[in-house]
Amino acid sequence: MSQTILLKNLYLSLENRSQKADKSFIADDITEERIQEHFDDTFEELFIELEKKYGEIEEMNIISRNCYVKFRFEEDAEKAVADLNNGWFDGHAIYTELSPVTDFHEACCRQYQVG
């Protein structure tokens, strides 16, 4: 078992939603500050809701649209996976599974080294 869950393709940033093929923004009001604010708000909303519903979170990271959540207890991670796969977030179905990642720093460094 694992304390960590992966929420696949959960986060779609304003930057990705609002760009044309030439990388310019569709809407004039999309700024770097607004993109960061959207990310921060989404992160906070997810963290609070997941911890309130499933148990104490030790660490959470959003990387390349995926959200990794490490709960304190494996039972909380299992409960979250079972329940979240029936849910929706931001208009999209949630796809969740247990993840073998327990050390986010090590996983990020290894991914960078491997390419």
Image: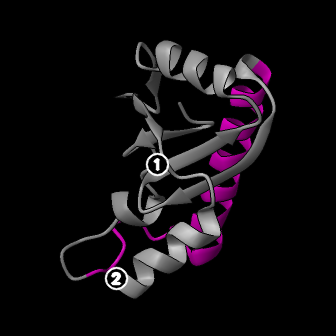
Q: Is residue 114 above or below residue 6?
A: below
- Of residues 114 and 82, the one nearer the viewer is 114
Q: What label does residue 92 carry, if any?
A: none
Disc 2 from disc 1: Cα separation = 24 Å
Residue type at mark 2 is Val
Instruction: Please provide percent x and percent y for residue 98.
Output: 47, 34
Where is residue 46 shown, x and y percent of the image? Answer: 65, 37
Q: Residue 47 location in percent, x, y? A: 72, 39
The answer to whether residue 91 is above or below residue 20 is above
Q: Is residue 26 left or right of residue 49?
A: left
Give the magenta part as a residue range: 23-52
**Label 1: which residue?**
11
Quadrant for residue 71, please give it: top right
Tell me if residue 30 comes above or below residue 22 in the rendering: above
Picture quadrant of residue 19: bottom left
Observer-side mark, 2 or 1, equals 2
Q: Residue furthest front?
A: 1
Residue plotted at (36% across, 63% down): 16
Assign a secondary structure to mark 1: loop
Q: Secondary structure at mark 2?
A: helix
Q: Which residue is mark 2?
A: 114
